[in-house]
Amino acid sequence: MCRILFAAGDGRDVAPLLDALVKASENDPYKEKRGRGKQHRDGWGYVLLKDGSVRHYRSMKPVFEDTEAVESLRGELEGFVTLMVHARAASQGVKSLFNVQPFAFSSRHGFTFWLIHNGDLDKSRIIELADLDEKELENASDTYAFATYLCRKLQNPSLSNLLVHYRTIEETTKSLFNTVTLFHRSTGDFMAFVTARMSDEYMENPLNYDYGKLLVLKKEKLFAVVSSTLELYHPAEYEVAPNETAFFVRIREDAFEVETVHL
């Protein structure tokens, strides 16, 4: 499984979180204690929203070895930004650029979105819910199947519709349903939807809980949700996201509004 970062706000506050994700991906004590190695090295990617432009990047290099790309991204973290980053440790789907996140999809209903996820979902069940062909998605990850479900079934990214469909997929959670999705509607507005969900069986193990929990950081000019390991490399006044929590973030040109709901 993976390390994720979502942040909206002043780029100067976001940069230390990016640095922490790079370090956490190279040396993750929580992952190592679970006997799964200490690195997240199966590719990484990001989406950066800034000044009316979107940059989407994916690479099979581990984030901690992709120095030039990380430095380029860090150099963009000035002013108001929205950033989502994913460092992959593969659990489902082949290790290839195809399965590196964020995934990008465009819906026939007039919106596009980028999606990242940490955890394991019941891929076969999602394929059934989305009326897909399992053979066609044999090499795709469970997250790709989830994104395809959203592209087919979600009519618009209003909060009420998001809750319906994310609750449907939530029921397929095997371990974690920690997700970030950035939506862009044809009307021009952006919004993000972030979920924090851990299965009851998974969280019974304290090692799993420490590894899988999401942390929330709120400051005057920053809202961020990050994987737990980042706190080891960037100490701050985090709060643990309660299980079955979602955050709906409306993103303006230089500001954000956050609504917290039960998933």
Image (tube, rainbow, N blue to C red):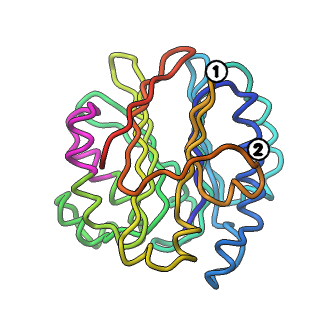
Query: Cα distance, mark 1 to mark 2?
Result: 20 Å
The quarter of the image holding the N terminus is: bottom right
40 shown above or below 144 = below
Residue visible at 39% across and 59% down in the picture? 197
**What label does residue 80 carry, if any?**
1
Residue visible at 64% across and 20% down in the picture? 80
Q: Main secondary structure of the magenta part?
A: helix
Residue visible at 77% across and 67% down in the picture? 27
Residue 202 picture location, percent across and down: 42, 76
Magenta residues? 148-166
Element class at badge 2: helix
The residue wearing badge 2 is 69
Give whichever of 186, 159 is nearer the camera.
Answer: 159
Give whichever of 94, 262 is nearer the camera.
Answer: 262
Q: Do the CB atoms of the residues marked 1 and 2 lie less than 8 Å apart?
A: no
Residue 14 picture location, percent across and down: 69, 35
Where residue 29 sits, quadrant-wise, is bottom right
